[in-house]
Amino acid sequence: MIYFIGIPGLIPFYLCFYNIDLIFLEFDKDMFLIYSSVILSFLGAVYWGIYLSSNNKTAIVFSVVPCIYAFFVLSYNLKFDITLWYLIFGYLIVLGFDFFFYFKEQIIKLDYFILRVILTAGIMPAHLFYII
């Protein structure tokens, strides 16, 4: 079920990359940055649930880090390519925490961990294609 809900979240990244316009939405570079920041923030929010189910103090602290990070990345109004590199770095940091919570703390379920690896593998090319 989580794959059915999670994987379609990659679609807007590629709609933006190909500048596909649907109805009244223009999928362009600006929307790409906004969507990427929202998704990065959402990944941190997952750690609220991890904290609630495990009472892990690291999880609750980390839960707000991606959102604050994305906020500052967008706030500095950097060049588009540089912003993308910072967002890529943010996704890799979150994936690092996913590895930590799966392997070391053992409080993330296997299906969620696999989904996160798949989604990160889908998100990275979209960002890198824009840079090259």
Image: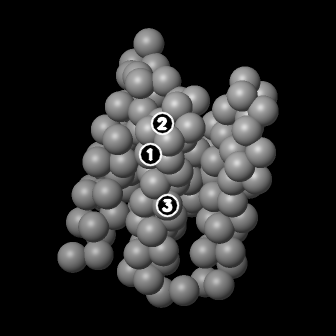
- The image quarter containing residue 22 is top left
- Quarter of the picture containing the N terminus is top left
Tell me if 70 is positioned left or right of 60 in this view.
left
Look at the image and tell me whether residue 124 can be seen.
yes
Mark 3: few/some/many CA within 10 Å (<14, 14-19, 20+): some
Q: Look at label 2 and name its amino acid.
A: Tyr
The residue under label 2 is 102
For this rendering, which residue is in front, 57 or 19? Answer: 57
Closest to the observer: 118 or 84?
A: 118
Kind of residue at disc 3: Ile
Q: In this view, does 131 lie to the left or right of 45?
A: left
Which mark is in front, 3 or 2? Answer: 2
Horizontal side of residue 45 vs 35, given as left or right: right
- Label ID, residue 9: none
Residue 80 in the image, given as x and y percentages of width and height: 44, 80
Q: Mark 3 points at which residue?
A: 93
Q: Which numbered dot is residue 99? A: 1
Circle 3 SS class: helix
Q: Residues within 10 Å of mark 1 (few under 14, many from 20)?
A: some
Q: Do the residues labelled 3 and 2 touch (CB within 8 Å)?
A: no
Q: Earlier in the sequence, mark 3 or mark 1?
A: 3
- What is the distance, in whole Å, between disc 3 and disc 1 at their CAs? 10 Å
Cβ atoms under marks 1 and 2 closer than 8 Å = yes
Quarter of the rendering occupied by the C terminus: bottom left
- Mark 2: which secondary structure? helix
Residue that protrudes farthest toward the top in the picture: 1
Precedes in sequence: disc 3 or disc 2 = 3
Q: Residues within 10 Å of mark 2 (few under 14, many from 20)?
A: some
Q: Which residue is drawn at 27% across and 67% down?
A: 128
Query: Can you say whether 107 is above or below 76 in the image?
Result: above
